[in-house]
Amino acid sequence: MSQLALFDSRETLLTNDERGRIAYSARFVDAATAEAWFTELRSAVEWRGERRMMYDREVDVPRLMGHFWLDPAPASTPAALLDAACRVVDSLRVPFNSVGLNLYRDGRDSVAPHNDHLNEIRNGFPIALVSLGATRRMTIRAKAEPRTAVRVDLEPGSLLVMDYASQLHYAHGVPKTAERVGERISLAFRVRVQRPRTAPAGDAGSRLYR
């Protein structure tokens, strides 16, 4: 099923037109479940830092990352991640086979505006983002006129779903903030084109966002 399944009445449509559909559900899971998932993943995931070229110098990526394949999930996959994956798949009726994790340690960690690499995800399938820990604001901006912009506070236990078309027409990011904020973990579920045959469990395989 390549289209977004219907949400319940708690969803908020951030955009829903010919340029794509982006929906937000603030209470995808209850607060206790979200807190338990955060606690387990914070300690169980082997978080890694990466570096990238920016202009003429190499800099640290301002967040830590992790990744797991789900088809099938390796034995090392944390139980909290399996639970989250099961709930997202059941809710959206989408066969997600990959999850990228990001750890925002404080307000200095961020991700610049971007869209997903469409050559790495299957055509027509959405991207689902579960947020845990501290609330952080995401900005969503249209790439062309009319250049509409949406800001949404991603609360712990929330689910943001962006359809495939939205990646063609919108850029999304989590900017830095001067406010004192705690740690946040995001789980980005995708239907990837294929699993690299030689990729070990936990290997990123590509750039991971949010």
Image: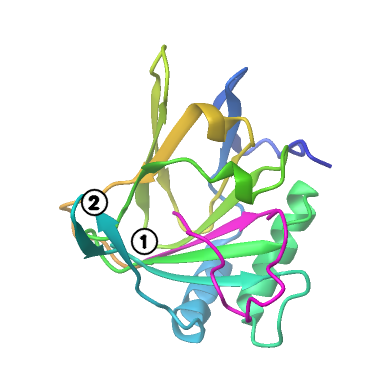
Q: How crowded is the residue under tag 2: few (<14 C-alpha within 10 Å), some, or many (20+)? A: some
Disc 2 target residue = 176
Q: Amino acid at mark 2?
A: Lys
Judged from the image, the secondary structure of the residue bearing numbered disc 2 is loop
| Dot 2 and dot 1 residues touching (CB under 8 Å) | no
Q: How crowded is the residue under tag 1: few (<14 C-alpha within 10 Å), some, or many (20+)? A: some
Q: Does the magenta stretch mainly form a helix, a strand or a loop? A: loop
Give the number of the disc on residue 134: 1
The residue depicted at 41 percent of the width and 12 percent of the height is 145
Residue 190 inside the magenta-drawn segment: yes
Give the number of the disc on residue 146: none
Lower sequence index among marks 2 and 1: 1
Residues at marks 2 and 1, CA–CA distance in whole angstroms: 13 Å
Give the image location of residue 90, x and y in percent: 79, 56
Quarter occupied by the C terminus:
bottom left
Image: magenta residue range: 184-210
